Image: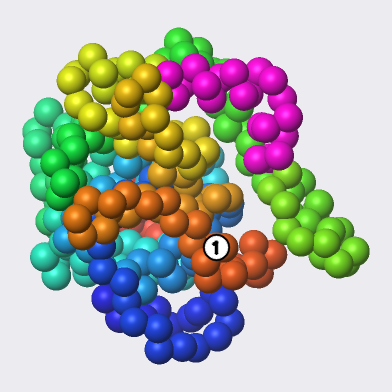
């Protein structure tokens, strides 16, 4: 993949692309102002892989039903993914709850532009470990049994991102480093911590039930890699706040990459100009 026409770090370099056996990314939430599509485009332009898993919430259908947000970086992300598919990268797309409109297509086993749609997948690392790959919202009791509360939570999260921006503008004027306010609140609120723990335990239990060595998921925007009861639990994070990806190196070694930290990208940097809503946009069911 070629370099994108803009560099979120504000610098030009000739750093060679890193190649991985497998890359897992989720929770891009394209179609929202909170999506760091510019950071993701930077990541995709500087890496290549044999296999790419899109682990849900790639396009935010919930938000696009209510309002339209799309910029050049959003377009660039889609272009780079499609270019990778044309170049021979195997791409598996597992829809999440925010892009659940694509789940209606799962029974047809569709493959669109070289991208396979799957409910979940089994990935075998080069060192032989069997990993269940799924978005994970199936094990979120709020999403599953109280969708109205989930929508309220989504709006509260979007509001927290707006507050987070002003909070960090004030910190920057005081000479303080960036801090994710919503991530900090998650760690401080006991109920949120318990919910994350329950989610992780549930996913690990499902992997154990299926007789695999581990599970890779997204959904809760909390990057993590640890062993739970003899099962490897990995959450690849998101591209709203953490901007993380799970990668598999040659030989099977797994690593969580914090791309914003690695590239020293500023979350306060302005995004590109908003693009008009196309008249041919299909209705989101």
Above/below status of 146 relative to 59: above
Asked if one can make out residue 159 in the rendered structure from this viewpoint, the answer is no
Q: Quadrant of residue 4?
A: bottom left
Above-or-below relation of 200 to 12: above
40 relative position to 79: left or right: right
Q: Position of residue 145 (x, y in %)?
A: 45, 10
What residue appears at the point 63 percent right and 36 percent down from the top-left corner? 157
- Indicate the colouring scheme: rainbow
Give the prevailing secondary structure in the magenta stretch.
Answer: helix
Boundaries of the magenta span = 182-201
Q: Quadrant of the N terminus?
A: bottom left
Residue at point 49%, 33% (across, down): 220
**Residue 252 position in % (x across, y down):** 22, 51
Foreground pick, 46 / 113: 46
- Left or right of 25 on screen, residue 237: right
Q: Residue furthest right?
A: 174
Please check the rendered image and state whether residue 199 is part of the magenta-colored stretch, yes or no: yes
Name which residue lies at 40% across and 89% down: 14
| In-front residue for pair 146/119 | 119
Left or right: 228, with 261 as reference point: left
Q: Which residue is mark 1?
A: 260
Residue 118 position within the rendered picture, expressed as x and y whole percent measured from the top left: 18, 36
Residue 228 visible in the displayed image = yes
Mark 1 closeness class: few <14, some 14–19, many ≥20 residues within 10 Å: many
Q: Is residue 187 above or below residue 211?
A: below
Q: Where, by quadrant of the figure, is residue 154 drawn?
A: top right
Label 1, secondary structure: give it.
Answer: helix
Q: Residue at x 36, y 74 (%)?
A: 46
The answer to which quarter of the image holds residue 188 is top right
152 or 56: nearer the eye? 56
């Amino acid at each position: 993949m070629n370099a994108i026409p803009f560099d979120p770090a504000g610098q030009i370099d000739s750093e060679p692309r890193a190649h991985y056996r497998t890359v897992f990314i989720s929770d891009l939430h394209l179609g929202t102002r909170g999506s760091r599509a510019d950071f993701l485009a930077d990541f995709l332009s500087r890496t290549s892989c044999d296999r790419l898993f899109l682990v849900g919430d790639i396009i935010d259908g919930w938000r696009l039903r209510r309002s339209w947000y799309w910029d050049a970086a959003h377009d660039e992300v889609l272009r780079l993914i499609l270019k990778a598919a044309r170049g021979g990268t195997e791409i598996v797309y597992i829809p999440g709850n925010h892009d659940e409109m694509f789940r209606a297509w799962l029974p047809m086993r569709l493959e669109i532009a070289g991208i396979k749609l799957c409910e979940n997948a089994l990935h075998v690392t080069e060192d032989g470990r069997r990993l269940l790959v799924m978005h994970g919202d199936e094990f979120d009791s709020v999403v599953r049994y109280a969708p109205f509360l989930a929508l309220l939570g989504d709006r509260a999260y979007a509001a927290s991102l707006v507050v987070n921006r002003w909070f960090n503008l004030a910190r920057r004027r005081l000479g303080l480093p960036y801090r994710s306010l919503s991530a900090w609140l998650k760690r401080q609120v006991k109920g949120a911590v318990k919910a994350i723990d329950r989610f992780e335990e549930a996913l690990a239990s499902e992997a154990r039930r299926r007789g695999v060595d581990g599970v890779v998921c997204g959904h809760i925007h909390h990057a993590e890699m640890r062993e739970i009861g003899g099962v490897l639990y990995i959450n690849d994070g998101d591209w709203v706040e953490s901007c993380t990806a799970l990668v598999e190196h040659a030989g099977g070694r797994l690593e969580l990459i914090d791309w914003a930290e690695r590239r020293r990208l500023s979350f306060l940097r302005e995004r590109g100009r908003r693009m008009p809503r196309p008249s041919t946009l299909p209705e989101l069911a």
